[in-house]
Structures are given as structure tokens and as C-alpha cells.
Image (cartoon, rainbow, N blue to C red):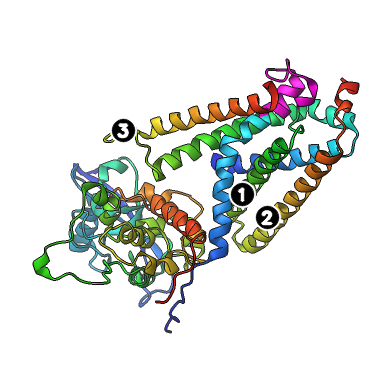
């Protein structure tokens, strides 16, 4: 059931994000700023982040079953190892994005 | 009563929609968390990495690359989320309305993607970065 | 389990449907002597032999190979030959026909729909050219065997269909076992025309109907993972549209 809930939160977050873009695009920056600083928006975003990460873990475990991860010529990763490898990849991608768009 | 023998045919449209849904699943897993964190958690709360960067880089609105990034991440996640949610509702007992739910789902996806592209286009061409500095 | 005059007994509440006598189905309660090593099928056989000869159900091998004794035991699709009474200790056991199938009589369901689907997916190795016997067998590496082995373990017991809510809503859905078996041949290197099965598995009511509930893989008594086969078949379908269409027949 949680899997279905993740899709609900992901959808709602995407719609809210589009709404935030519309506020920015209107040129009235303060309305955008007020909206994202609203504790309700922040609270929802934290919940959405939690569900997105939960989605990521279930997605990785499914991918690990569909495409078996090879750790060597004879060794294949256990489901837990497959999730760990994917989570590591997720962290690397996240840091690359932070670096590319913000820190650079 | 003999059943008419079923004619089978590969359904390319469903294959395509599922393909997009599946790619959207990867996008939501790999790209969405960092976008949520930066724009809606780190920015309003002043956390790393937004805290010690120049203000204009808070939202991904600085380059063509970041615009594409937002379109792919939000668009892919929207498609994935709505697609999965609409296929789940009939299981929860809304079996009768499944074709209506499906239609509404695709309308939400279509409207969402058009709005997303429209606002990103506007921002890419007309956003004034100095706004950030004036307010904060 | 209760003790009646020194003998431990188990109570079975069995779904009965006898269209020749009564139009409405009903539930009949039976008490059978309980032993630690008894399975549900043993209890049904005891009823048939000693209490009520009119009870109808399918069974054959008693050892989880033939796939004919499936029933909903306490609401879960199970092989009655592989469900021990002691798993349900201390309570009445509800025995019903497999869910999602039309009932013919008592625990016997109409399996015609699955049999047709099974036939449609061509569950045999298709060779474009048979090599003569003297050339020897078609050989495979252990890795090539591994690609389809688990799916070949299916015994057509249809528990996965009874567990699948999608099949419950839409009888036209190709369903778990038929897709798993189609994939079993698609993934077999000896098969030379995988694409012959694509119109069936990639049909509108083929794999695309599946929403990844996963119950099929949970209830399978042979460790087959039909959900995985369906996902792999979906990937094949999605990548197939990127390929140019097949020429000729």
C-alpha cells in the first residue's frame, strides 16, 4: 500500500512544483518566497522527500531482481547489495547535481 | 455458448506509455530527491548547500541545462506518479470508473506537462535574477 | 483443534455448491480426527470416505506436482496437499474453491479460460529448422538454463490467478502463469521464434494490465516469480517499439 502512497505524494509534489514555477514566472517573487517558506509547504516537502526515497528503495530492489547486478565473473549481488549499490549511485548523482547547479 | 477466439495484437501505445512510466520511475528515484531537498527544504530552511551559495542559484533557473533538468525531473515524476496512481485506484474498489480515472489521469499528465513547459520557457527567457537579491 | 471423547478433531467449514440439488451455495461443517501430520487434502479425503461421499474436489498426486488440488484455504490460495492442519491449529479451517474462477461444483472450478490461454502462448520450443536426431541434443550453458529455469517449474495450479486482483476484475487478462510460461520459452535459447508470442503477451490485455501487486509470486507453491516474468516481458515490449517492424512472416 505504501508503494501506491508514494505515487500519490510524487504526483502532488510535481503539481505543487509546477505551481511554484507559475508563481516565479508571474514575476512576483515575494509570492513564491512566501509560499515555499510556509511551514505547511516545507512539511509536505519533507514527507514527499521521505516517500520519494522509499520509492527509490523499492524501485532499486525491483531493478535488482530484473537485472541481476554482477560483482564479478562468478559473483552476483544479493538483493540487499543491489539496493546498496543503487543508493550509492543515487548519492553520487545527487552530489553531481548539487555541484553542477549550485556549488560550481 | 462458444467463446469467439480472441484476436491478439501487440499494443504499441501501451508499450510506449509503460516505457515512459518506467523511465519516469528511474527519474523519480534518482533525480527527484535532490530537487525536493534543494528547492523546498534547503532553500526555505537555509541549509547546505544553499546556505553558502549565491542566492540566484537557489532554484534551478540559471541555464538551459538546469531548465532541461527541471523539465525531465518534474515531468518524468508527474507521469510516473499519476500513471501508477491511476492504475491503483481500480484495485481499491473503483473498478467501474477505471476508464474515467484513466482519462482523467492522462488529462492531468498532459495539462501538467504543457504548463511545466510553458512556465519553464517563460522563466528561461524572462526571469529577472535581480529579484532574488532585492527581496532577501 | 478440539477434543471430542478423547480423540482430537479438526473442524472444516467447506464451501458447497450442488446445482443439481440446490441453486444457492452453502457452507457445511465437518469434524475430522486430527493428526499432526495431516494435510487439508487428507481431511477432505477423510470426509469423502467416511462422512459425506457427495463432496467433490480435484486431486491426484498428493505431493505438489500435479497442481490439481488448489483451493482457497482460510482465504489464501493454497495446494491442499501442501497445507498442514497444524498450521491452522486452534481454529476452524475455511475451505473454498479457488477465487476468481467460476464454480462448477463444490470445490471444483472451471479452468477452461486458463487452458485456452496456456494454449495461445505456444508453450513449446519453436524451431525454424529441426536438426536431425543424429546431430545430438540442443545444448545450453548453465547460464542459459538459469535464464528460464525457475519459470519452467510452474505446475499450472492456478493459485496465482486466484491471488491476482487484476484477473479478478478482468477475465481477459492473460495473467501470471501464462505470462511466466510464455517468458519461459522466450528466454530459452533453443527457441527460435520468440516473437511469435509477442502479440499475446503484449496484447492490450496482456502484460500491460499488470499493476505489480505481486501476490502471484507470494502464493506460488513452486517458487516461480510470475511478477518478475511479467516485468521482463514488459521491458521486451517497450524496447520492441524502438526496433524496426519485422518483414514478412
The reply to whether residue C36 is visible in this rendering is yes
The mark found on residue C124 in the picture is: none
Residue corresponding to mark 3: A72
The reply to whether residue A1 is visible in this rendering is no
Decide which of C192, C187 is in the foreground and name it: C192
What is the crowding at mark 2: few (fewer than 14 residues within 10 Å), some, or many (at least 20)?
some
Which span is picked out in magenta?
B37-58
- Quarter of the image that includes the N terminus of chain C: top left
Judge left or right: residue C7 versus residue B100.
left
Badge 3 and badge 2 both on one subunit: no
Answer with the quarter of the image where residue C160 lies. bottom left
Decide which of C20, C189 is in the foreground and name it: C189
Q: Is residue A19 above or below residue C161?
A: above
Outermost top residue: B52
Instruction: Examine the structure image and report whether residue C233 is included in the region drawn in magenta.
Output: no
Of the image marks 2 and 1, the number of the one nearer the N terminus: 1
What chain is tagged by disc 3? A
Judge left or right: residue A85 versus residue C53.
right
**Secondary element at image label 2:** helix
Residues at marks 1 and 3, CA–CA distance in whole angstroms: 38 Å
Residue corresponding to mark 2: B105
Residue B110, x across and y down, in percent: 72, 55
- Of labels 1 and 3, the one closer to you: 3
- Identify the residue at image location x=21%, y=47%: C142
Residue corresponding to mark 1: B85
Dots 2, 1 in contact, CB < 8 A: yes
Judge left or right: residue A53 versus residue B43.
left
Q: Is residue B21 above or below residue C158?
A: above
What chain is tagged by disc 2? B
**Secondary element at image label 1:** helix
Residue C212, x across and y down, in percent: 48, 50
Amino acid at each position: 500500500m505504501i508503494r501506491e502512497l508514494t505515487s500519490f505524494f510524487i504526483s502532488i509534489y510535481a503539481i505543487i512544483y509546477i505551481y511554484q514555477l507559475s508563481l516565479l514566472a508571474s514575476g512576483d517573487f515575494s509570492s513564491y518566497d512566501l509560499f515555499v517558506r510556509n511551514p505547511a509547504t516545507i512539511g509536505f516537502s519533507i514527507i514527499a522527500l521521505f516517500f520519494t526515497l522509499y520509492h527509490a528503495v523499492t524501485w532499486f530492489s525491483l531493478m535488482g531482481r530484473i537485472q541481476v547486478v554482477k560483482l564479478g565473473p562468478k559473483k552476483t549481488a544479493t538483493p540487499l547489495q543491489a539496493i546498496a549499490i543503487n543508493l550509492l549511485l543515487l548519492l553520487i548523482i545527487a552530489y553531481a547535481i548539487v555541484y553542477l547547479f549550485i556549488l560550481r | 455458448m462458444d467463446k469467439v477466439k480472441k484476436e491478439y495484437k501487440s499494443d504499441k501505445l501501451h508499450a510506449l506509455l509503460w516505457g515512459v512510466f518506467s523511465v519516469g520511475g528511474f527519474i523519480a528515484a534518482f533525480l527527484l530527491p535532490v530537487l525536493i531537498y534543494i528547492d523546498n527544504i534547503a532553500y526555505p530552511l537555509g541549509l547546505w548547500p544553499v546556505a553558502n551559495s549565491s542566492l540566484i542559484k537557489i532554484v534551478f533557473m540559471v541555464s538551459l541545462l538546469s531548465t532541461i533538468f527541471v523539465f525531465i525531473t518534474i515531468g518524468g515524476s508527474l507521469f510516473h506518479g499519476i500513471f501508477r496512481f491511476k492504475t491503483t485506484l481500480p484495485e481499491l474498489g473503483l473498478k467501474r470508473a477505471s476508464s474515467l480515472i484513466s482519462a482523467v489521469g492522462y488529462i492531468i499528465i498532459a495539462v501538467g506537462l504543457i504548463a511545466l513547459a510553458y512556465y519553464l520557457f517563460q522563466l528561461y527567457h524572462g526571469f529577472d535574477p535581480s529579484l532574488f537579491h532585492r527581496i532577501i | 483443534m478440539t477434543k471430542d471423547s478423547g480423540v482430537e478433531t479438526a473442524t472444516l467449514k467447506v464451501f458447497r455448491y450442488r446445482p443439481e440439488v440446490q441453486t444457492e451455495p452453502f457452507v457445511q461443517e465437518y469434524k475430522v480426527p486430527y493428526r499432526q501430520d495431516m494435510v487439508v487434502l487428507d481431511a477432505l479425503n477423510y470426509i469423502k470416505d467416511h462422512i459425506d461421499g457427495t463432496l467433490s474436489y480435484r486431486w491426484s498426486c498428493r505431493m505438489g506436482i500435479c497442481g490439481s488440488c488448489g483451493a482457497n484455504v482460510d482465504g489464501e490460495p493454497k495446494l491442499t496437499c501442501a497445507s498442514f492442519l497444524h498450521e491452522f491449529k486452534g481454529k476452524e479451517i475455511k475451505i473454498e474453491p479457488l477465487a476468481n474462477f467460476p464454480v462448477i461444483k463444490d470445490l471444483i472450478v472451471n479452468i477452461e479460460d486458463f487452458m485456452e490461454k496456456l494454449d495461445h502462448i505456444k508453450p513449446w520450443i519453436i524451431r525454424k529448422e529441426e536438426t536431425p536426431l543424429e546431430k545430438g541434443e540442443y545444448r545450453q550453458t548453465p547460464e542459459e538454463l538459469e535464464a528460464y529455469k525457475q519459470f519452467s517449474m510452474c505446475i499450472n495450479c492456478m493459485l496465482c490467478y486466484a491471488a491476482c486482483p487484476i484477473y479478478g476484475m478482468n477475465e481477459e487478462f492473460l495473467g501470471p502463469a501464462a505470462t511466466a510460461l510464455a517468458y519461459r520459452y522466450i528466454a530459452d535459447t533453443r527457441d527460435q521464434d520468440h516473437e511469435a508470442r509477442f502479440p499475446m503477451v503484449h496484447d492490450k490485455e496482456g502484460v500491460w494490465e499488470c499493476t505489480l501487486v505481486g501476490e502471484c509470486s507470494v502464493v506460488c507453491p513452486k517458487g516461480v516469480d510470475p511478477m518478475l516474468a511479467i516485468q521482463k516481458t514488459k521491458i521486451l515490449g517497450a524496447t520492441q517499439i524502438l526496433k524496426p517492424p519485422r518483414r514478412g512472416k
